[in-house]
């Protein structure tokens, strides 16, 4: 346990928290707010488009990877960009707090887009920082700590938001979340600048922007690897934005969702993350990706029964625990998998490319989810979503011999 308590790993834990906090504010928490405000399911499905910065961040990651940040260049390249993006993030969350969806849902979408953009910028730097600040022998612990921090951030902005909203309303809730986002600023100021993140001013445009992508394309079956990254989380992406409207329609209350879905679910995710740490010493990351992905798809089918029996809290608790436990294993394996694909010379740019592709499905394939739920009904919607996991798993079997 002591090896997880080093200063760099504690910083990674806190930066993971800062990365995880904004996601629910433009995803499950926001869709719950929209559903409670009476916004149509199809429109809620289209709200997944606000996450587009996560899918496009590779386009500006080379500049954040190589150039000093505006205003905070004295802090160093990584820390300067962290503080810059985190301050923008706080302002965007405050803006989102001040807009009522019932009065102007378009402005809500624009504000959510700003939150997602600032969050994507922060993620670019956090992902690079995590790889660079620890040695090669600590990359496994680094992946674990970033996942734990990320999940804690998500529970604060999901379960915490529902509890806050139940007692204080949505505007105060989003202002609370803006205050929590300041933890990221404090962490960045306390952190050390990685030694590798030195000056690259002598590099050409080609070396800064083009070479990282050329380097990755030299891998055998690189196109199939990129396609796998897009498809692996497709089932999760499809249902992610619709679970909150599903729970609202079944009649679950905010405290019930906060307690069962968010708190118990997050605890199960932690268990899955730590169990991954046990499994990864015995099995390859590729094997864990496959079996965790398969089991996770099966657990998604449990929502089909929930649609039939209604607001049964016991079944919800069981299905949420199963889903999040397998999800924790799969998410940790996926983070380790992406990190292992990166060349240390181009960490931020290549990781941004890979994580952008992972977010591609979460954003674009989720757009028709609201319409699908409306047409198919909840039971068949979740059955269809589970089947979407199969293409990624089949592709993994085809490329596994080329992966280490």
Image (tube, rainbow, N blue to C red):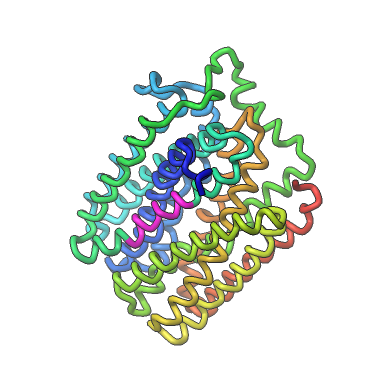
Q: Could you tell me if residue 93 is visible in this image? A: yes
Residue drawn at x 48%, y 79% as measured from the top left: 377
Question: For residue 159, what is the image quadrant?
Answer: bottom left
**In this figure, what is the number of numbered marks?**
0
Q: Position of residue 268 (x, y in %)?
A: 48, 65
Q: Which residues are magenta?
A: 148-159
Residue drawn at x 58%, y 12% as measured from the top left: 202
Q: Position of residue 93 (x, y in %)?
A: 30, 46
Q: Could you tell me if residue 59 is visible in this image? A: no
Does residue 61 belong to the magenta stretch? no
Of residues 375 and 62, the one drawn nearer to the viewer in this rendering: 62
Of residues 154 and 147, the one drawn nearer to the viewer in this rendering: 147
**As drawn, which residue projects farthest toward the bottom?**
309
Q: Main secondary structure of the magenta part?
A: helix
Up-down relation of residue 377 to residue 120 (above or below): below
Up-down relation of residue 18 to residue 164 (above or below): above
Of residues 285 and 70, the one drawn nearer to the viewer in this rendering: 285
- Residue 125 lies left or right of residue 297; in this view the side is left
Q: Position of residue 309 (x, y in %)?
A: 44, 87
**As drawn, which residue projects farthest toward the left?**
168
Up-down relation of residue 316 to residue 137 (above or below): below
Does residue 155 belong to the magenta stretch? yes
Q: Position of residue 354 (x, y in %)?
A: 60, 43
Residue drawn at x 51%, y 49% as measured from the top left: 1
Question: For residue 18, what is the image quadrant?
Answer: top left
Of residues 388 and 348, the one drawn nearer to the viewer in this rendering: 348
**As drawn, which residue projects farthest toward the top?**
202
Residue drawn at x 53%, y 69% as measured from the top left: 323
């Amino acid at each position: 346990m002591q090896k997880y308590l080093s200063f760099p790993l504690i910083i990674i834990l806190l930066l993971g928290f800062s990365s995880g906090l904004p996601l629910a504010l433009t995803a499950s928490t926001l869709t719950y707010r929209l559903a409670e405000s009476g916004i149509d399911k199809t429109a809620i499905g289209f709200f997944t488009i606000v996450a587009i910065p996560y899918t496009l961040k590779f386009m500006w990651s080379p500049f954040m990877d190589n150039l000093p940040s505006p205003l905070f260049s004295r802090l160093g390249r990584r820390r300067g960009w962290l503080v810059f993006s985190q301050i923008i993030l706080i302002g965007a969350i405050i803006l989102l707090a001040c807009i009522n969806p019932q009065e102007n849902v378009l402005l809500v979408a624009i504000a959510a887009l700003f939150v997602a953009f600032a969050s994507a910028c922060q993620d670019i730097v956090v992902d690079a920082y995590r790889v660079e600040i620890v040695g090669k022998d600590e990359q496994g612990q680094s992946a674990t700590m970033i996942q734990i921090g990320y999940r804690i951030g998500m529970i604060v902005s999901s379960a915490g938001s529902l509890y806050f909203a139940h007692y204080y309303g949505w505007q105060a809730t989003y202002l609370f979340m803006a205050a929590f986002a300041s933890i990221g600023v404090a962490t960045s100021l306390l952190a050390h600048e990685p030694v590798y993140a030195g000056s690259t001013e002598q590099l050409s445009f080609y070396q800064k922007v083009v070479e990282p992508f050329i380097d990755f394309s030299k891998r055998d079956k690189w196109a199939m690897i990129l396609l796998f990254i897009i498809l692996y989380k497709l089932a999760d992406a499809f249902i992610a934005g619709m679970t909150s409207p599903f729970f609202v329609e079944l009649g679950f209350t905010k405290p019930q969702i906060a307690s069962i879905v968010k708190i118990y679910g997050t605890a199960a995710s932690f268990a899955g993350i730590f169990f991954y740490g046990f499994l990864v010493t015995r099995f390859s990351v590729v094997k864990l990706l496959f079996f965790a992905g398969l089991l996770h798809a099966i657990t998604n089918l449990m929502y089909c029964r929930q649609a039939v029996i209604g607001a049964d809290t016991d079944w919800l608790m069981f299905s949420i625990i199963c889903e999040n436990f397998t999800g924790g294993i799969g998410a940790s394996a996926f983070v380790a998998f992406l990190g292992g694909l990166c060349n240390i010379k181009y960490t931020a740019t290549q990781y941004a490319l890979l994580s952008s592709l992972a977010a591609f499905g979460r954003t674009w394939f989720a757009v028709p989810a609201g319409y699908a739920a409306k047409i198919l009904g909840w039971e068949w919607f979740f059955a269809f979503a589970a089947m979407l996991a199969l293409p990624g798993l089949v592709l993994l079997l085809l490329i596994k011999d080329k992966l280490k």
